[in-house]
Image (cartoon, grey):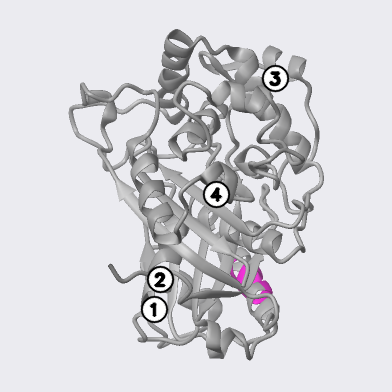
Amino acid sequence: MPGIRDRIAVAGVGATRFTEHWEKDQEDLLCEAVDEACNDAGIERSDIQAIWAGIYYHTTGLGGAAAVDPLRMYGVPATRVENFCASGMDAFRNACFAVAAGVYDVVLACGVEKITDQGSRGLPNVREGMHPFLPAASAPAMFAMAATRAFEVHGWNKEDLARVAVKNHANGVHHPKAHFRRAITMEDALKAPMIAHPLGRFDSCAVSDGAAAVIVTRPEIAKRMKHKDDYVMVKANAISVYTAQPMYKPSFDYLGFPATQTASKMAYEEAGITDPFEQISLAEVHDCFTITELLNYEDLGFCKKGEGANFIRDGLSATDGPLPVNPSGGLKSFGHPIGATGCRMIAEVTRQLQGRAEGVQVTDPELGLAHNLGGPGAVCSVTILGRQ
């Protein structure tokens, strides 16, 4: 089946700091990220032929004008992409397909979100658009059910969750664009206020503002651009969507996310990966909650079912381990401006493969994976990038 393997190149990336940007609006953030990506690729805004922008909240903007207005790129085809928390990586997916189809030569995938000035606790308006009679739990409550289930079935405990938080915050200390740049101890994580049992404050990623951008083109064009010697190749991108109401689906066991399992399987097949633990050099995964990262290890095939806690206990996901996971610090350190996260992950993996990570640099990586999970585990996008 035709795919995008080795037909697409990442020519430039950019991102703002992810934090509480009280002095900037979403237009400022998007322009900052896009201009950094253009400078990184050695192009001008005028070289961009089409735009896909990942945006979740209507407060950030509806329609393609949410990107065109701040960038002053009037007349350029622009599309807003919304697919739960995977909106940013879905924008990247659409950009890749458009270039692979030969419709455009140079396009922009970006994402932006401005959440912290909306005055709500946690994710605002999380129940909008849901079923009128079947209520939806909060995000922490939904993932707390996965944690309690894993505790019961696998024998995991709060310390296993805390290890994820400690690892990722230790990595985030070194990243200049992370929202939180302070290391925490196991005691800090275990004694933090409870959010939704057993998930405490340090088990949950924060609300944040930010933007990220990726310049997408073909390899033959990338060879004439700024990163002509080290542009990054797209090996695969896959997306899978399951129910947005898993709590009402009797077969859903909360011990993993079918969307991740299916998307990773499709991505591995396209990229020619048969043993992800051995072949993937690093991964940026969606750690919206600490339990999610542990389940991601299993769903992505890094280890067997039930072994996610052992994976981190044994140091396998540490930056000096055989498969570093979230060397940037992940969502735990950056927060989660929903539309921007997927593009930020692409940017992080790209920089790692080029040997110029803004935080902790993984030793000599060959293949990198980015994993973006949305909603209550309803949608997942998996991207695999590789060096030339």
Residue 128, label in figure: none
Q: Earlier in the sequence, mark 4 or mark 2?
A: 2
Q: Earlier in the sequence, mark 4 or mark 3?
A: 3
Q: CA distance from mark 1 to mark 2?
A: 6 Å
Q: Which residue is mark 3?
A: 189
Residue 337, label in figure: 4
Prevalent SS, magenta region: helix
Which residue is found at the position 33% from the left and 37% from the top?
258
Please check the rendered image and state whether residue 107 is part of the magenta-colored stretch, yes or no.
Answer: no
Mark 4 or 3, which is nearer the eye?
3
Q: Is residue 64 visible?
A: no
Residue situated in front as seen by the camera: 362 or 30: 362
Report x, y in % for residue 288: 53, 36
Q: CA distance from mark 4 to mark 3?
A: 23 Å
Mark 3 or 2, which is nearer the eye?
2
Q: Is residue 368 visible?
A: yes
Q: Secondary structure at mark 3?
A: helix
Residue situated in front as seen by the camera: 361 or 307: 307
Q: CA distance from mark 3 to mark 1?
A: 45 Å
Q: Amino acid at mark 2?
A: Ile
- Give the magenta range: 30-36
Report x, y in % for residue 34: 60, 73
Mark 3 or 1, which is nearer the eye?
1
Q: Residues within 10 Å of mark 4 (few under 14, many from 20)?
A: many
Residue 4, label in figure: 2
Q: Earlier in the sequence, mark 1 or mark 2?
A: 2
Mark 4 or 1, which is nearer the eye?
1
Residue 100, label in figure: 1
